Image (tube, coloured by chain):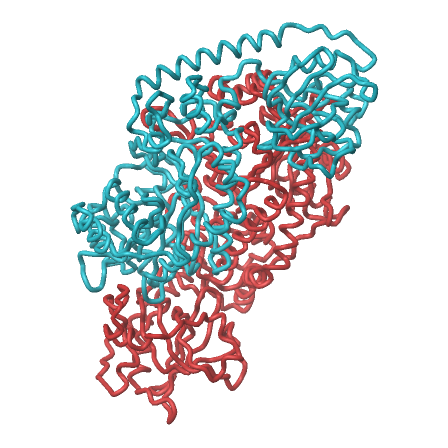
Chain colours: A cyan, B red
Amino acid sequence: MSSEPEILPSESSTVASEESGEKISKKAAKKEAAKLEKLRRRQEQEEAARKTASISLEDDEYSSNYGDVTLNELQSTPDPKAGKWREAVEGKEWTDVSDLVEEMVGSEVLIRGRVHTDRPVSSKLGFVVLRESGSTVQCVVSQSETNKVGTNMVKYLRQLSRESFVDVIGLVVLPKEPLKGTTQQVEIQVRKIYCVNKALAILPLSVEDAARSELDIEKSLQAGTPAARVNQDTRLNNRVLDIRTPANQAIFRIQCQVENFFREKLLSKGFVGIHTPKLMAGSSEGGSAVFRLEYKGQPACLAQSPQLHKQMAICGDLRRVFEIGPVFRAEDSFTHRHLCEFVGLDVEMEIRKHYSEVMDLVDKLFVFIFTSLNEKCKKELEAVGKQYPFEPLKFLPVTLRLTFAEGVQMLKEAGVEVDPLGDLNTESERKLGQLVLEKYNTEFYILHRYPKAVRPFYTMTCADDTLYSNSFDVFIRGEEIISGAQRVHIPEVLEQRSGECGIDVKTISTYIDSFRYGAPPHGGFGVGLERVVMLFCALNNIRKTSLFPRDPQRLAP
Amino acid sequence: MSSEPEILPSESSTVASEESGEKISKKAAKKEAAKLEKLRRRQEQEEAARKTASISLEDDEYSSNYGDVTLNELQSTPDPKAGKWREAVEGKEWTDVSDLVEEMVGSEVLIRGRVHTDRPVSSKLGFVVLRESGSTVQCVVSQSETNKVGTNMVKYLRQLSRESFVDVIGLVVLPKEPLKGTTQQVEIQVRKIYCVNKALAILPLSVEDAARSELDIEKSLQAGTPAARVNQDTRLNNRVLDIRTPANQAIFRIQCQVENFFREKLLSKGFVGIHTPKLMAGSSEGGSAVFRLEYKGQPACLAQSPQLHKQMAICGDLRRVFEIGPVFRAEDSFTHRHLCEFVGLDVEMEIRKHYSEVMDLVDKLFVFIFTSLNEKCKKELEAVGKQYPFEPLKFLPVTLRLTFAEGVQMLKEAGVEVDPLGDLNTESERKLGQLVLEKYNTEFYILHRYPKAVRPFYTMTCADDTLYSNSFDVFIRGEEIISGAQRVHIPEVLEQRSGECGIDVKTISTYIDSFRYGAPPHGGFGVGLERVVMLFCALNNIRKTSLFPRDPQRLAP
C-alpha cells in the first residue's frame, strides 16, 4: 500500500542503486520479484502439505515427552497435574536462548523459542533451530542409549510448522564442529519437546527471506540463482512477521536506546519531561496538513507538533522541558522520509541571552546519543549492518556550525546557485552535505541563521538583519533532521508575525495570551525519532524505523 | 469550563468535605467566591493603576544600572554594546535562585526571576522578591555609602508588575533576621536591575492566591477574614499562571519522575520501549467512546489504548514491551478521575506459565516507584503537601493480592452486598479499600480473578472456572488505577470472544491475524500517569495532574 516503490532485484540493481532508489528498471524488477515470489510460495505450500499430512503418533513409552500443550494448560492453571507439559515444566525456570553459552554445557535447561528451521534427517534423527528474539540455537532429537526418546518424537518434530512456539527440555552440549547457522555455539540434546502455540503452515512471508542480507541477494543475482527479496508492502502488511528479523529486532532496540540517551542527557541538565495534549482547538501551527475531527460538538485537530504547548510550559515556569510523543501530519508526502504519524522528540528551554545556547544543547545532546549508541548498541548495529550494510556516522566531538549564508556560498563555489533568501531543496541539502563532508569530515552539522521568510511565524528575527532569523536546521548524512530556533516571546510581535503569515490570530489566542503574563526569552527544537534511527543507520526508508508506519496510503496494521 | 464543581470556601466547608467534594453547599460557596474574586480584582486594579501611573525617571549618573531590556538586545545580538543590559551581563553567568545559599555570601551574582512580590518602603529603600520555579529570594534596593544607586532605581522598582522577568546583579548578603517569606535564606543587595519582559499589570489570577494552602484558607475562614481561593476553572483557563505555583511546579516534576522510575525498572528487566500508532482503522477496543476522523478518505479513529498494537509487538518477538503515550477516550465522564486524553503507561509481556508473572511485575514495579518517589522527591512532595495536605501512601514491601471472590466476601461480611459476577462500583471499591486498609494496613493492593463478563473480549478465561478470568485490577487509596490480564493468544478463541462481545471481527482482522503466525502466551496491564500522581498525593481531581487537561467540555488552552 506504500507509495514508494520498493527496490526489487533485477540484473541492473546494485547496492548503490538500492540506496538512491531511482535508477533501476522498476517494471522488470517487479516482474522478476513476482516470479520469485510465486516459486517460493509453491515450495512452501508443498512443504506445508507434507507437514500437515497426518502423521500417526502411536502411544509409546516416551509419549509424555512430546506433544501439543492444551489451551487449558496455558490458561494459567495452577494444577501441575493438568497435563504433561505442566508436569514437565513444574518447578523449572526458563533460560533465555541468548544465555545459552559454553559454561552451561552439561546442565539441563528449559527453553522456549520459535521453530526457525527444522530438518528431519532420518527416522531416528532430527534437527530444529529455535529462535528467541534475535538469538538462535540448534536442538537435536536423536535416539541413543543415553537419550531414549522414541522415533515418534522425530515424527512429531516434522509436524511443527515454522514460527510455532515450542518448549524444549534438554541437555546443553558442545557440537562436534562450530555451528554456522546459529548465534549460540552450544547445542541442545532434546529430552522433551512441547508445542506451546502453532503457527499456520503457510505464512504470508518467510522470516528467513525477510532477514536475507542485501549483500547475499546481490551475490545470488550475480550467480544467476536469485534469492527471494521480500518487498516492502509485503513486509508492512505482515509487520508482526517482518519485525522478527534480527535487523528489525535490533532497529527497535536502537530506537528505544535513542530515546533513553535523549532522556538521560536532558534529565541530567535539569529538563522536565512533559506531556502536552494532542487534541487541540484550531490548528497547531497553521497550514493544511492537519487532521481534523469533531470534539464533543466543537471542531478540533490533532497537534502537528507540541510547539505551542511546550512554549506555554516555559511560560508556566517549567524552564527547560522535553516531550516525546506522537506528532500528526496530514501531508500528502510520498517520500522515503515522511510519515503521517511519527514520534517527535521536542525540547524547549529558557535562553539567557543568545540562541546559540540552544545549539550548544543540540551539539552536546546528539554527540552523546551517537557516542552512546556506538558504545552500547554494538550488537544491534551489527545486526542491522548484516542485513543493510552501512558505514558508521562521521561526526565531530564538537559539532560544526555554519551560517546559512556560508552554506549558500559553499554551494555557489561548487557551481550550485540557490536563492540566498529561500529554503534549500532536498537536492541542495544533499549536495551541501557532500561538500561539508569533504571539507570538514563530518556528516552531522548545524546550519543556522536561516532566512526569516522560510521559517514559522513564531521564529525570532535576527537583531542585525531582519531578513534572517535566529533559527537552525541540523543535518545527518545530507538530510535535515532537526529544526530549531529562538521563539518570539513578545505578544505584540507574535500577533504581527502570525498575521503576516496568514494565520488567524483568534485561533491561537490562548497561545499568544500566554506571553502577556511575563515570558522569558526561550528557544527549542524538534526532531523525529524515526529519522534519527534511519539516518544513523543509513537506512533508505523511514518505514523501516517505524513499528507500524502510517503514510497517506497506510492505516493498517 | 470543567464540569466538576470546584469546591469553594463556605462556612460549612472543611478539609474532609474538600476531599469528598460532594457535601458542601455549592451555591453558597460559589457566591462567596464570586464576592471574594470581585474584591480581589478591585484591589489589584487599584494597585496596577498606581503602578502604571507614569513615574518620570530623569537620567541620573546611575541610570545605566536599571531599565527595560530592549527587544533588539533580546534578539540574541552578539554585540555587547547593543544596550546597557547587554553590557552589564557581558561575560557573566546566571546563578539559579535555588543555588543561592549562605556559602555564596560576599560574592556578586547575576540572577533572573519573576517579580513575585514587591514592597517600596521609602524613596531610598525597596524590596522585591524574585521567583524562579519554586524558589524565591529577597532583593533589596537601598541607597547607602557602599551601594550608590539613585532614588530613581527605587522608583523603577515600583513600575515592575508582578510576574515580570527581571535580571538582577547584586551582592549576596545574610539578612539581619531569618526570612520567613522566601525559600532562600540569603538576600541580594541590588546593584543593577533590568526588566527582561513585562507582564500585564492586571493578571487573570494572582500566583500568590493560586498557591495559598488549603489550611490557610480554612484558618482565614474560621477567623472571619476569608482569603481568596482560586477556583478550578479560573486556574485551568489560565494554566500558564496556575502552574507557576510551588505545588504545581512539584506535581509536574513528580509526574516526570514517575515516568523515569517506570522506565528505569522496566528497562532493567529487559523491556523495550515502543511507540504504536494512535491513528487506526476501526476502533481499538470497540465501544462508543472513540474519537472518529477521516484519514485520507478512509474512516479512522484515535487509539483508546495501545492494547492491540502492544500485543502485536509481542507477536513480533519484542518479548517485553512498554509504551508511554497519549490515550484518547471520547467518554462523557464528568468525574474527578476521567479525562478525554491522558497519558497511558502500558506494559505487555510474554508469560511462561501463569498470569501471576504479570502481577509479580506490577508488585515490584510500583513498590519501586513509590519507594523512589518518597526517597528522591522529598522536596516536591513537601511542596504539594504544603498546599494540599496529605498522608503518605501506605503500601507493603510485597503487594497484597486478593481474589475478586475474597473481596466480595469481605464486603459481604461488612454488610455490603455486591453481585459476585458483576463489577464493583466506585462506592464498593472505596469501601473495600477501607476494609483492606483496616485489615492489612495497606492502601495499595491487587484484586484478581475478575468475573469474565466484566472484562474485555481479549481477556483469558480461567482454566478451572469459565465464569472468571485471568485478570486483575489494582487499587490506590480505594480507587482503581491499573487494569491487567492474561490475553487470549489463540485466534479462534479471539474470534469467538469478540463475536460474543458484539465486536465486528472484520474491523480487527489484522489484530486477530497476528496470532495465526505463532503467538506466545502473554499478558500485560495499563495505568494512567495522571492517576498515579493524583492518588499518590491524594489530590482530589485529575485535572490537577494534567498539564493541559482535556475533558468533555475543555479543549483549551
Could you say which is closer to the camera, residue B377 or residue B40? B377
Q: In this view, does A241 lie to the left or right of A413?
A: right
Quarter-of-image position of residue B54: bottom left
> Residue at coordinates 79% horizontally, 29% vertically from top-left?
A90
Q: Nearer the viewer, residue B57 or B122?
A: B57
Q: Position of residue B227 (x, y in %)?
A: 48, 66
Q: Please say if B252 is above or below A387.
A: below
Left or right of A164, for residue B2: left
Q: Which of A354 and B419 is in front in this view?
A: A354
Total labels: the figure holds: 0
- Where is residue B235 shown, x and y percent of the image? 42, 55
The residue under the point 29% across, 29% down is: A22
With respect to residue A448, does A218 lie above or below?
above
Can I make out residue A90 in this image? yes
Residue positioned 49% across, 70% down in the render: B98
Q: In this orientation, which residue lies closer to the viewer: B241 or A476? A: A476
Would you say residue B240 is visible in this rendering? no
Q: Using residue A369 as the reference point, say whether residue B432 is left or right of it.
A: right
Residue A528's x, y, as percent? 39, 43
**Left or right: A548 with respect to B123?**
right
Residue A379: % across, % down: 55, 41
